[in-house]
Image (cartoon, coloured by chain):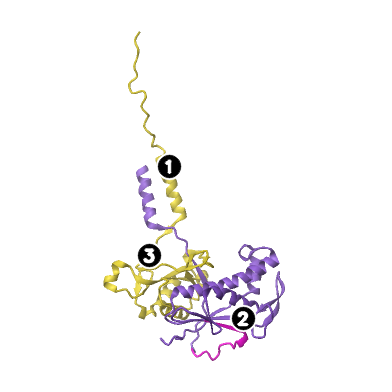
């Protein structure tokens, strides 16, 4: 009797990769929905102070950011370690806080007229900053009539 | 197909951020040209609680040195004035929708800091003062509507906000440390 031998009949069949794109697309859509575009390259380093009574900032399009802190390490060689203010992509020396007025005006221009009164300025400052700079920034914001502000802080459960 | 999907995925991973911005919201007082504040509204002494933070990050309330853990309770005590103390803020009984007549405290907390105060301490004090107001609001909301402030309906929240206004004044900056 002739016995037909099956060659390699016990090998595991290759894993089908035809569903891989579907899985990857699913992850892609998840990331597209849950994240937002990084708008500015940070040139100052900061770690936000902690607080318990924080409120989430709604409507990101109405928020303008002011960053305050030491320059990032790569830039410290040229700029030193004195704290600086960053408005979008622009560096401002702490002595030239008056430029904030122009910055606020140009940010306000970008919004449509109905939304202008809801504009919020988020101050993202390093927790080691001295209040002098922040007071100057606040005074400039008052002068520019941008009165709604938010001090960026991260959530903590208590001190 | 998978390669294209991978490329897109990696692009999104690199180009986007996930962090949600959150912080303590404040409204600054409008700019006034005369800095000597001659037309500033007079506030009676009993209605004003001064909070000073100096260059060494020490906190003083009503001229008394306090620890950060005491700030909230002191502020709350001051605003509520449960015993109708003569030296604590007056209350004005006002008719508020949904709540009825409620004695609205006239107390104002004035926060002043030195130019050399650290931002961290400043935020901690701001946070504690906010917490004092939030607790008062929560208590009132619980008592009237059986829900904490953040979970109440919008008109209820507005009513509570009207009954317990957030009165933290950030006074004109001064160099109190002489620095």
Relative height, residue B109 to residue B159 (above, below): below
Camera-nearest residue between B54 and B101: B54
* Residue A79 rendering spot, x and y as whole percentages: 29, 73
Chain letter belonging to callout 2: B
Per the image, the residue denoted by label 1 is: A22
Camera-nearest residue between A114 and A16: A16
Q: CA distance from mark 3 to mark 2?
A: 42 Å
Q: Secondary structure at mark 3?
A: loop
Total numbered circles: 3
**Mark sitting on residue B169:** none
* Residue B167 rendering spot, x and y as whole percentages: 58, 78
Q: CA distance from mark 3 to mark 1?
A: 32 Å
Q: Earlier in the sequence, mark 3 or mark 1?
A: 1
**In the image, what residue occupies the spot 55% across and 90% down?**
B39
**In the image, what residue occupies the spot 69% across and 67% down?**
B143
Look at the image and give the colour of chain A.
yellow
* Residue B166 rendering spot, x and y as whole percentages: 59, 75
Per the image, the residue denoted by label 3 is: A40
Quarter of image, res B139: bottom right
Q: Is residue A110 visible?
A: no
Per the image, the residue denoted by label 2 is: B107
Relative height, residue B130 to residue B18 (above, below): below
On whether residue B44 falls in the magenta region, the answer is: yes
Quarter of image, res B94: bottom right
Camera-nearest residue between A139 and B123: B123
Range of the magenta residues?
A: B35-51
Q: Do dots 3 and 1 share one subunit?
A: yes
Look at the image and give the colour of chain B.
purple
On whether residue A74 falls in the magenta region, the answer is: no
Q: Residue furthest left?
A: A77
CB of mark 3 within 8 Å of CB of mark 2? no
């Amino acid at each position: 009797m002739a016995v037909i031998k099956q060659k390699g009949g016990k090998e595991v069949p290759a894993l089908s990769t035809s569903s891989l794109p579907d899985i990857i697309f699913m992850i892609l859509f998840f990331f597209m929905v849950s994240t937002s575009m990084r708008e500015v390259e940070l040139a100052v380093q900061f770690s936000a102070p902690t607080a318990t009574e924080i409120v989430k900032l709604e409507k990101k399009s109405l928020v303008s950011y002011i960053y305050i802190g030491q320059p990032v390490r790569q830039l410290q060689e040229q700029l030193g370690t004195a704290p600086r203010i960053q408005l979008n992509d622009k560096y401002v020396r702490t002595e030239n806080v008056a430029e904030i007025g122009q910055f606020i005006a140009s940010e306000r221009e970008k919004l449509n007229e109905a939304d202008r009164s809801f504009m919020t300025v988020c101050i993202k400052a390093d927790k080691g900053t001295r209040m002098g700079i922040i007071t100057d920034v606040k005074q400039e914001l008052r002068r520019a009539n941008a009165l709604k502000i938010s001090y960026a802080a991260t959530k903590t459960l208590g001190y | 197909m998978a390669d294209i999907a991978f490329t897109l995925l990696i692009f999104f991973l690199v180009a986007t951020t996930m962090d949600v911005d959150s912080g303590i919201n404040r409204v600054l007082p409008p700019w006034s040209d005369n800095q000597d504040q001659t037309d500033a509204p007079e506030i009676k002494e009993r209605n004003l609680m001064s909070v000073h933070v100096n260059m060494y990050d020490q906190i003083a309330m009503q001229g008394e040195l306090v620890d950060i853990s005491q700030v909230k309770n002191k502020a709350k005590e001051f605003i509520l004035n449960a015993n109708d103390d003569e030296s604590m803020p007056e209350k004005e009984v006002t008719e508020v929708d949904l709540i009825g007549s409620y004695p609205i405290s006239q107390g104002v907390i004035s926060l002043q800091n030195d130019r050399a105060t650290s931002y961290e301490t400043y935020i901690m004090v701001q946070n504690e003062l906010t917490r004092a107001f939030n607790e008062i609001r929560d208590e009132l909301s619980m008592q009237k509507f059986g829900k904490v402030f953040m979970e109440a309906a919008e008109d209820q929240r507005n009513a509570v906000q009207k009954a317990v206004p957030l009165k933290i004044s950030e006074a004109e900056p001064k160099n109190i440390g002489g620095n």
